[in-house]
Structures are given as structure tokens and as C-alpha cells.
Image (cartoon, helix red, strand yellow):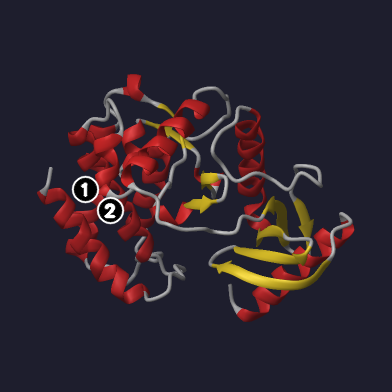
Amino acid sequence: MEPAELRRAVEAGRSVASEQGLRADEVVVVHNSDRVALRLLPCDVLARVAPAGHLAEAAFEVEVARRLAGVGAPVGVLDPRVAPQVHVRDTCAVSLWTYYEPVGPDITPAGYADVFMRHHAALRRIDVDAPHFTDRVAVALAGLDDRERSPDLSDSDRAFLHDTLGGLSAETSADGTRDQLLHGEPHPGNLLNTRGGPLFIDLATCCRGPVEFDLAHGPEEVAEHYEGADPALIHRCRALNWALFSAWRWRLDDQMPDRDHWRAEGLDRVRAALDRI
């Protein structure tokens, strides 16, 4: 967020916490992107704040988290001291979560696979109206087709990404019998090592597809410990994920730090992943 947006987000998070009877004398910015995560002290709650335009997404995340907590999934949970809901304050959507202090050591590939299997089992026990991962691909393709939204992308790279996304999406979704609810973006940054064990966070990306789509977001060694995973499908999903990542970087409104580097690096990663298929 830009500085003015961040100031509004901080005040919105503090205001919502105070209204819920939680003291928020100090605010620490934990993460700042299109939405922010704020640690509020001394109540020690994590406030996730997004522009109000993301209200539906925030409400979806809260509902997914509530249902997963009910079946004992290894996920970060909402703060139990307040009602599980999203609050709108000054053009911001605010939800309040339990804050987890990260601990070491790093999660091993076997440990990562174990928490994946437990999370996927829990996801099979809940029912939410989640999009298919191919819907995400369709949004990326629409952005590529609109040159005004991605004016810096060359014709050759535009065609390359378009063909890659379309082809891999069709191949990966061909066997619908493998589909189930997924985390959607369970990369290492969305898996916290806590005193209570590894926990997945950022649940707004929940979607449907094969478990290999999730596995392709993790370190490559993890899949070796996930029983029943299809290595060839993981390779296709990894290439698809890099193509999605690359497509987002070329959007005019993309705000990822060091975007120019990741524009070039993303295309290189797509080509490298395709070479392994």
C-alpha cells in the first residue's frame, strides 16, 4: 500500500480492535502488499486489512478459516475473543486473527508433506463454494488479451504466455476426478512454523483442482513425501503456476517489489519449467 493507504489501514485496524474491546496501543506492520497484516499490541492480535473492494474476498477467507478450524485443520485461526466476521472502516475491510510467533528450525520436506496431507484431508471435510483453479487462469488470460492492462509485454512474450496458460490449463484440468478443495497458494511464505506446529495462512486463495496444483507451490522435495502424488502432473502445475506468476507481473497495476526483475525472471522460470515436462 502507498503511505497514505497504509496510514488509513493502520487506523482502521486499530479502530476495529478497540471497538471489540481489544487494546491496540502499538501497531507493527508485519506484511505490506495489496493488503496489510498488522500486529496490534498489547492485545497481540493480527489484523488483516484490505481495501473495501476486497470485502467479498476477505469474507470468503473468514468463512473458510471458520469451517477449517471446526474440523481441526492445520491453519491459522481467527481471534477467539471476537466474532468471526469482516468489519468495514474508512474504505478498509478488517478481520482479526490469532497472532503466531514464528519459530525455528525450518520445516523439513517430510514435515511440509505431512501438513499438506492433513490440510487436504480437512479440506475434503468442508463444503464451500470455491472457484476452480482454471477460473484464475481465465482472469490471467483476460489480462494478457487486454493490451491496455499489460502494455509493456512484447507480442512474442504475450503469445508465449497465452499459449502456455491455455495449453497447460486444459491439460491439467482434463481429469476432473482428481479435483478437491485446495489451499490455492501454499508456498513457503504461507506456511508458518509455530510452537503448535506448521500452520497454513492466507486462505482466500482456496479453490478446486488436483492436489498436485497445491504441491507445485512448495519446494520440489516435498512431493517425494506425499503418497499418491503424480510427478508428471506436478511438473505441469509448476509450469502453470510460473506462467500465472509471470502474467500478473506484466499488469500495469502490479505493485510487486522489484517488478522489473521478476518480469524477466518469471519468463525464464516458465521456460525452465516447460523444459522439465
**Image mark for residue 248:** none
**Image mark for residue 164:** 1
SS state under label 1: helix
Tell me if mark 2 has few (under 14), some (14-19) or many (20+) residues whose alpha carbon lies within 10 angstroms of its own: many
Residue underneath mark 2: 243
Residue type at numbered disc 2: Ala
At x 22%, y 68%, the residue is 154
Residue 158 occupies which quadrant of the picture? bottom left
Left or right relative to 201: residue 134: left
Left or right relative to 16: residue 95: left
Query: Marks 1 and 2: which is nearer the front?
Result: 2
Query: Which quadrant of the rendered structure holds the C terminus?
Result: top left
Q: Nearer the viewer, residue 134 or 47?
A: 47
Spot occupied by residue 196 in the image (x, y as percentages of width and height): 57, 45
In the displayed structure, 192 sits above or below 61; it is: below
At x 71%, y 52%, the residue is 95
In the displayed structure, 198 sits above or below 261; it is: above
At x 50%, y 52%, the residue is 192
Left or right relative to 204: residue 53: right
Spot occupied by residue 43 in the image (x, y as percentages of width and height): 79, 61
Q: Nearer the viewer, residue 210 or 66?
A: 66
In the displayed structure, 84 sits above or below 101; it is: above
At x 57%, y 24%, the residue is 127
Q: Nearer the viewer, residue 190 or 167?
A: 190
Q: Whole-Å distance between the Cαs marked 1 and 2?
A: 7 Å
Mark 1 vs 2, N-terminal side: 1
Residue at the bottom extreme? Answer: 3
